[in-house]
Amino acid sequence: MSLNIGRIIGIPVRIHYTLWFVLLLIAWSLAEGYMPQHYPTLDRTTDWAIGIVSAIILFVSVFLHELSHSYIAKKNGLPIKRITLFFFGGVSEMGEEPKNPALEVRMAAAGPLTSFLIAIVLGGAWSLTVLVNGPNPGPLTPIIATLWYAALLNGVLGGFNLIPAFPLDGGRVLRGSLWNRSKNLLSATTNATRVSEAISLLMMAVGLFFVVFGDFVNGLWIIFLGWFIRSGAETSLRQTRLTESLAGVRVGDIMTRELLSVSPDATVQQLVSDYFLVHPHGGYPVISNGKLLGVVTMSSVRSIPREKRDFERVSQAMVPFERTITVNPTTSAIDALQIMAKNGVGRLVVMDGDKIAGMVTRGDLMKTMKARQELGMWDLSHS
């Protein structure tokens, strides 16, 4: 659940709904807790104004943090699909992994360095404002409070992201360093994930200690952060294994070329009896005079009541060509898998120009991935 807010340097930018929650939480905690405690001379309206402005500054800071990752990636030829800002910061979704460990480290380090730079600038502005205002409360006190808290938030954002655990920037710096030493991306990812899991377990243990001894809210936060890191590390390892096992594989290498096709004039019952109950495939191209008209699948059949299957034609049940998702033989296996996931389909028609070349299914991709993993046929270009 994300809201698209536009593009910058050609990259779509989205806000996940959890970020709105965090911004509101920060504004509320400042207005109702931090400001009355540390700046009791300010009125309630000013407290809320400071809370809202601080939340906006955090939003801009998180965006600049993620934009720095994306800028380095694009500058080095890596495609960025989108930037999504969410609960713990954001993520720059890359179309592929960095080609070398040095690039991984530069990309990962750019985020925390940007946050620290923002903190230094805001801290410098805070110091200057304090000098102008003097030690006692004055007209610049609201600005002083805002600058101090914004600088603190950016420092915390940069420091938190330097924790050497996936999916944080520090975890990517760690993986890049291990990759540089071992010359093997998968091994580096595996070892970085182990470190991440150890850190996450330690954090959850500390959080539980806080909960037991009365600091319930902070304890829950720490436990949640530990869970977040553990989950992110495991996801990163699975993604790397998937990417490495299918790297270099094209759809044309694994697609089914000799296809069983269905006539658009066949009844749905004939399709069931002669195809789905006889052959192992879950979908078939519908072809007439050598032209692809669409694809018919088991889900297409399920949408037809049983009492109508003797009369309904395949042409009425199929997904027409205009809505059929196609790829070409040179499409990478990874891209094909992502297309299937994005569109909620289990198979893709492979077109070579205006001719059907074959079909590739999720099962084909999973079978290839499993075989290459078991045979140790990882991509060596990252080694």
Image: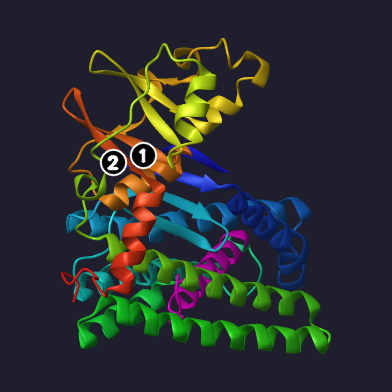
Quarter of the picture containing the N terminus is: top right
Provide the major secondary structure of the magenta segment: helix
Is any atom of residue 139 visible in this view?
no
Front position in the image: 94 or 290: 290
Residue lying at 44% horizontally and 13% vertically, measured from the top left: 315
| Residue 351 placement (x, y as % from top left) | 22, 31
Task: Please tell me the numbered disc located at residue 10.
Answer: 2
At x 37% / y 17%, what residue is drawn?
263
Instruction: State whether residue 322 appears in this view.
Output: yes
Q: Where does label 1 land, which residue? A: 7
Where's residue 102, x and y in %?
Answer: 20, 75
Please tell me which residue is depicted at 31% across the width and 32% down the height of the picture.
326
From what the image shows, is residue 308 above or below residue 153?
above
Residue 118 lies, in percent from the top left, at 40, 66
Q: Are marks 2 and 1 in contact (CB under 8 Å)?
A: yes
What is the span of residues highlighted in magenta in the rendered image? Answer: 142-167
Amino acid found under the numbered disc labelled 1: Arg
Q: Quadrant of residue 180?
A: bottom left
User: Residue type at mark 2?
Assistant: Gly
Relative to 135, is 46 on the left or the right? right
Disc 2 secondary structure class: loop
Residue 114 is situated, as x and y percent measured from the top left of the image, at 36, 66
